[in-house]
Amino acid sequence: MSSSRFGGRYAHFAHKAGCLCNLPDMQRVSLRLDSFSRRGFMTGLGAMVVSGSLTGRGMAQVSPGDRIFLRNLRLFDGTGDSLRTDVQVVVEGNRVIDLDQGNNPPPEGAKIIDCDDGVLMPGLIDAHWHTLYAAVPLQVLMTGDPGIVFAASTAEAERTLMRGFTTVRDMGGPVFTFKQAIDSGIIPGPRIFPSGAMITTTGGHGDLRMPFEIPRDGESLSLSELMGSAAIVDDAGELQRRVREQLLQGASQIKLVGGGGVSSPRSPLDITTFSEAELRVAVEVARDWNTYVAVHAYAPRTVRRALAAGAACIEHAHLMDEETARDIAERQVWLSMQPFLTMDDAGTQTGPGAERVQQLFAGTPRVYEYVRKYGIRTAWGSDVLFSPELAPRQSAMLTHLGRWYSNAEVLRNATSVNAELLATSGLRSPYEGKLGVIEKGALADMILVDGNPLDDLTLLERPAERFSLIMKDGLLVKNTLSE
């Protein structure tokens, strides 16, 4: 295969800012990335894992099995409307083992932490995140070094955790090995519910091939397919295989692309791709694996087709009409929504993306009006891509919800409500235990806020200043309090 043909596959990394694929700089990117296959991508992480050079900062402050006694706190347990002041929290291993309401002395040998009257709440959950692509900028991708890409992603995974996000649902990317590195404690980061490759059709969002790569040359794959970021399929048999491949690698849910997208320059938001019969094939495979399908869809027709096929979750739906909203509510299907409001949430956009993102801005308030009117089960996600500047706005995207919800509802949305969506993975859930709440038996993921987020949501936007303690899986990844 010639370098020019192979190189064109890499140009799609620029699509977030418009189609720059024919620029000389992008052609040089393509040549540099000649060996950037999925095997090389995974090998880059494997080398990091073997070297053990990326050790989580602060991850060993408490040994597994140690008992931690948290006192002098106000508790938001993830489910209520108000704070509790009559409780002390006991953690052992990676679980909450007791909520002590008797003001009892700490257990013998426990590590005692005075919370200084802070608000203890469950760790935050982002239901639409891209672990490997959230903060990797184009100039980093231009180096052509998988190690640098993984270093950038590793740094962002730690920053995500330090923003208080202890769990994310990854909605597209070759994240399986990265997840293993986090789960084993080699690198710090949130729990990951992985989708693996987002599965699309020819011409759908995620099909970022260049014109000279079309038609497909036999079984040749584009870069995004080689890396495991996307899978382009056009028949039911191939669709079944690609779904099963993601599940084989450990996907907790499947993501199908039902239409166009903002960052795919030749895939308008209004188009619909998979047929209902094709979507149904994927849904049946996921059900056979005791999990579910989430469908990326913006236009009303696209959403309705996904609903008719049995999808359990709709991603985005910013263009949907009221009839479609009623259909979602009646079927009790999840809506995973991202509250894009201004260019501050989307970064620099050129080309088709600039016009499309304006459609998202216009659709966001309307969708939340439908959500409130019809009682749609709605998860929250941020969907940040390709920008170290935008990634920290993950928290600001959450506080946007205050326009439509009470502060308590916002906190529940990012904790117990999002955890309900994660639980839809059923037997394919990668973690045993309850998330999104602080209760006896739940997984010990929590943050301590200096101040009361029920009064001031913007405290969540200043985690470095306002989060005095962050715990994930019973380990203190941040603690500025006296012991």
Image (spheres, rainbow, N blue to C red):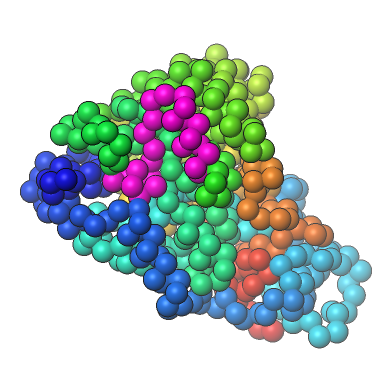
Taking the spot 32% from the left edge, 27% from the top edge, the residue there is 202
Residue in the foreground of this view, choosing between 219 and 299:
219
Q: Name the quadrant of the N terminus.
A: top left
**Looking at the picture, how far across and down is residue 77, in whole percent?**
74, 55
Taking the spot 40% from the left edge, 20% from the top edge, the residue there is 272
Residue in the foreground of this view, choosing between 206 and 372:
206
**Is residue 271 shown above or below 418?**
above
Most common SS among magenta residues? helix
**Is residue 284 shown above or below 399?**
above
Q: Which residue range is magenta in the image?
A: 223-246
Res 411 visible: no
Q: Is residue 230 magenta?
A: yes
**Looking at the picture, how far across and down is residue 27, in whole percent?**
12, 49
Give the side of residue 114 with respect to residue 259, left or right: right
**Looking at the picture, how far across and down is residue 277, in whole percent?**
51, 18
**Is residue 52 shown above or below 7?**
below
Give the side of residue 432 with respect to residue 386, left or right: right
**Looking at the picture, how far across and down is residue 305, in whole percent?**
51, 18
Res 292 visible: yes
